[in-house]
Image (cartoon, helix red, strand yellow):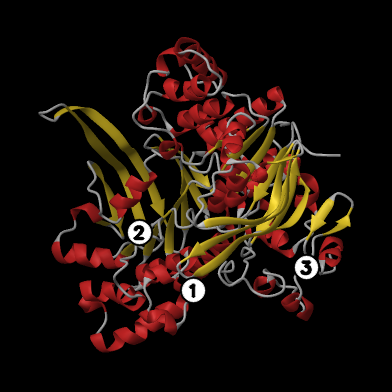
Amino acid sequence: MSHLLEVQDLHVEFRTRDGVARVLNGVSCHVDAGETLALLGESGSGKSVTAQAIMGILDSPPAAIRSGRVLLEGRDLLALPESGRREVRGKSIAMVFQDSLSALNPVFPVGWQIGEALRVRAGLDRKSAARRAVELMDRVRIPSAASRARDYPHQFSGGMRQRVMIAMALALDPKVLIADEPTTALDVTVQAQIMDLLMELKNERGMALILITHDLGVVAQVADRIAVMYAGRIIEQAGVHDLYRRPAHPYTRALLESIPSRHRQGEPLTTIRGLPPNLLRIPAGCPFHPRCPIAIDHCRVVLPPVTEPVAGRLAACHRTREVLDGSA
Amino acid sequence: MAAPEGAPLLEVRNLVKHYPVERGLLRRVQGHVKAVDDVSFTLARGETLGIVGESGSGKSTLARMLVRLETPTSGQALLEGQDLFAMRGEELVSLRRRMQMVMQDPYTSLNPRMTVGDIIREPFEIHPEALPRSQRAARVRELLDLVGLSPEHLHRYPHQFSGGQRQRIGIARALALSPQIVVCDEPVSALDVSIQAQVINLLEQLQVQLGLSLIFIAHDLSVVRHISSRVAVMYQGRIVESGPTEDVYNHPAHPYTQRLLAAAPVADPSLRRSTG
């Protein structure tokens, strides 16, 4: 069965002054209509680069896609010329960025910016584009949308600006929406409202949602499936309940234990020793082995392949079975 | 004058900070923003008081007043009975030794042109009476060790460190003069999850080891719950609720606290707020 969007064995490098950074090292994942896939990882894990490669907005150079495919309804986007990519961008796959203040143009009213895609891409005249922009602002629940459409980005609060970004992303009715840390800069109460809105829109339109985040709380609340990234690899993929109940990779397990929880009040938090690897010098074997509490000699030498220890779950760890059954 | 035994180490009374809102060419004052509006609380010796609130709640302004980076509009803060804001000259200098601050952003709060050794040594340049010159090198090494860094780091510059390590440097600097109170303003919010835990553990361990009193300001409710024995919730410049941490979290009395706790995403998919 083919998926709505499928990433296959994606390799991306960045040329830097100090050498070649291997930022993505064989990323494979997929998402279907109406589904929420969370790409979870810490800074430098490759989650945003994965999104940018899917979206076709990687800065090249320094970035270069070495190999892999990004299939949208079976068609490889990486094989398309730039004009073809542009056609897909916005119309089939749209993106909401973390920093709405720098993602929006400060010198144009937000209504004009939301309407831009409608004028340029959908061929609407100014008047109907403006009307549609107000409808979209209304849909993302910006109060008094008609008058606020004439306001500039700096006149909105962070949460309202994020709604503007969502309205803009929805303009051409995309099949896939990528949200890159959409609520990271927002207050808790606003964050909850924005996530609720995204989920509601996803359900209403049957969109696929790729949520990029480092926040284990947000992921637990909204994701259907989770792909955990480390050093440019997806090291574990599973349904949200399975992953939180019984992680299959020691990194996932350590992450879950490192966040404060009511159940372990008064105890020191579990920490992951050391630091994420320098992507210019990824360790041999499993990239997590220097920080892994259960690494064995084999892990230092052989890169663990992605396996399916339990039906429907993927893990890249030599000891995943023991992690799953709790014996390691 | 020493305060009696059992009295709080720090007692904040009716603290207020208003900022004028100026408009137009003549900068006429149009009104005031009440950044901190009649805040009172106490801090006991060896205690961690958590202060939670969203952006604009006044928690950072409060922190900056306590270390006298901002001057309050009115109110008092009594440190062992002495009002911080009435201190001048010698007294103020000695206050700065007793209260220190750890900043949020480990990337901008360290001078990029100074080595780690210089950064941690700088408090002694400003307060030479704190420690004779001959003992400073040893003290700097001791501080590095205390926060989990090694002597080889002394001659490196901040940019050579990760965010978590930089925050350790900031903590070492704050501890240099052996303060009684450390005000931590969002000390882990710029750090990755796995690194956050290291820094939180370090702060907890140092608190016990050195008998510090901590004021821990953060927007992350689960972090505050973990580290604090008491918590105060700030909203629009006021403390709307305070009490022992577990009481506030389990039985929030103020509608804002209830809203805040209900909105916080719990890292457990079986406790979803709504069915996405």
Q: CA distance from mark 1 to mark 2?
A: 28 Å
Q: Earlier in the sequence, mark 1 or mark 2?
A: 2
Q: Amino acid at mark 1?
A: Gln
Q: CA distance from mark 3 to mark 2?
A: 39 Å
What residue is disc 1 on? B209
Q: CA distance from mark 1 to mark 3?
A: 42 Å
* Along the viewing direction, whichever of B222 and A252 lies nearer the viewer: A252
What residue is disc 3 on? A304
Density class for disc 2 (Cα within 10 Å; few <14, some 14-19, many ≥20) is few
Query: Is residue B253 visible in this depiction of the protein?
Result: no
The part of the image, by quadrant, that contains residue A157 is top left
Q: Nearer the viewer, mark 1 or mark 3?
A: 3
* Along the viewing direction, whichever of B99 and A211 lies nearer the viewer: A211
Picture residue at 35% right of the left edge, 56% below the top: B10
The part of the image, by quadrant, that contains residue B107 is bottom left
Q: Secondary structure at mark 3?
A: loop
Q: Residue furthest bottom?
A: B134
Q: Secondary structure at mark 1?
A: helix
